[in-house]
Image (cartoon, grey):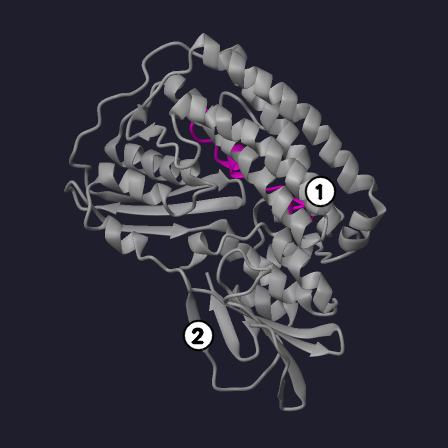
Amino acid sequence: MESEIKTDNRFVVPIGPQHPALKEPGHFEFDVDGEVVTGASIRLGFVHRGIEKLAEQRNYIQDLYLFERICGICSHIHATAFAVAVEKLAGVVVPPRAQAIRTIVAELERIHSHMLWLGVAAHEGGFDTLFMYSWRDRETVMDLLETIAGNRVNYSANLIGGVKFDIDDSQRDAILRGIDFLDQRARYYLKVVESDETFLGRTRGVGKMTRGEAEILGAVGPTARASGVARDVRLEAPYIGYADYPVVLVLDDRGDLEARFSVRILELFESFRLIREILSRMPKGELSTRVPRRIPEGEIVLRVEAPRGELYYYVKSNGSEMPERVKVRTPSLCNWASVASLAVGHKLADMPMLLAGIDPCFSCNDRLVTLRRQDTAQTMTWEDLRQYGIQYYRGKRVCP
């Protein structure tokens, strides 16, 4: 639904939860003065599936496949985060070859996610040719994932204690050929987003977020790195194979939509380099280690870098075959505050691109708490935001 509603001398444009411009359900309300947005609010939660509660009724092996279903685009990193958390609770060491394979699949998934995002963002900006090109080319990486794991989505590569499959010489050669092709295509994409005048008109200077604003609003992933925030869990707290195969951080300090496009495309080249390096010196050895069915009592918080940014898993074990509690905090939830904040002052026509700029996933972030205040204050200062660590709009606070 999209229509203007006049309320208290304000015009409110509601968009969603069902709307042609939205790939998933979310409800947005934009206060407008003519074509200029003066206020914004976001309501999520339309596709909450209770996955965390379901995990308490299943054993750790079953949960591994359950958490893959949180997000189809980043299914591997969710399963990896849960598996690594359980392995740390169990006190087991995963063989280096298994960790290297996990890293290869994680970087292939990052390539897939960024290319899918590029097409969606281009479509929102009216650049359907780039949309079709990028989605055509992403078939290459999906075919590679199918060659390795047998699945194009929800690869189920992980076991608790290792991985299910090896990468043989023929698969290695296929990956390298696919990476070489995608490398050429990514160079073309970078040229387009940095030189096409029509595209730059929709991205340059739009949604600009300074480094300080990004830190206060809690932005993560490429959205934060496009504002100069030097944070990447693969470097800060290396997991799986990233300690042996370090990542080079991709940063941009411009902070606008153009920078968010550039950072994600440049991250493709870093993923290409990393995959080539791992394949060139793949360790030999076993693919898994034994893990007890009953995980020792304890709790752990694990951080990983999903394609969209920092992903948290909290796992609590009571010593049985099933976890007592699992809590997931996805990166999209952290980036929503930046959308609502940056919308003010821009034209309504910029909203689809601004939303696409954070690469949102509605289904994976539907876990939040809304606190309603009795007062009618409309704004908070940056210092207030820093103090409370939450975003405040129109008498509502949305807390991760």
Q: Quadrant of residue 178?
A: top right
Q: Position of residue 392 (x, y in %)?
A: 55, 72
Q: Position of residue 318 (x, y in %)?
A: 18, 46
Residue 343 vertical placement versus 228 (above, below):
below
Q: Quadrant of the N terminus?
A: bottom right
Q: 289 and 343: which one is in front?
A: 343
Q: 184 and 329: which one is in front?
A: 184
Q: Position of residue 202 (x, y in %)?
A: 77, 54
Q: Tell me the kind of residue under disc 2.
A: Leu
Kindly identify which numbered label has been placed on residue 297. none
Label 1, label 2: how many angstroms apart (C-alpha)? Answer: 43 Å
Q: Residue furthest bottom?
A: 8
Residue plotted at (70% across, 24% down): 184
Residue plotted at (42% across, 28% down): 240
Write down the residue under mark 1: 129
Q: Tell me the kind of residue under disc 1.
A: Thr
Q: Quadrant of residue 64?
A: top left
Write down the residue under mark 2: 371
Find numbered disc 2 in the image and state the secondary structure of the residue it sits on.
strand
Dot 2 crowding, Cα within 10 Å, few <14, some 14–19, many 20+: few
Tell whether 255 sits left or right of 27: right
Q: Position of residue 62 (x, y in %)?
A: 23, 40
The part of the chain drawn in magenta is: 224-242
Residue 210 vertical placement versus 397 (above, below):
above
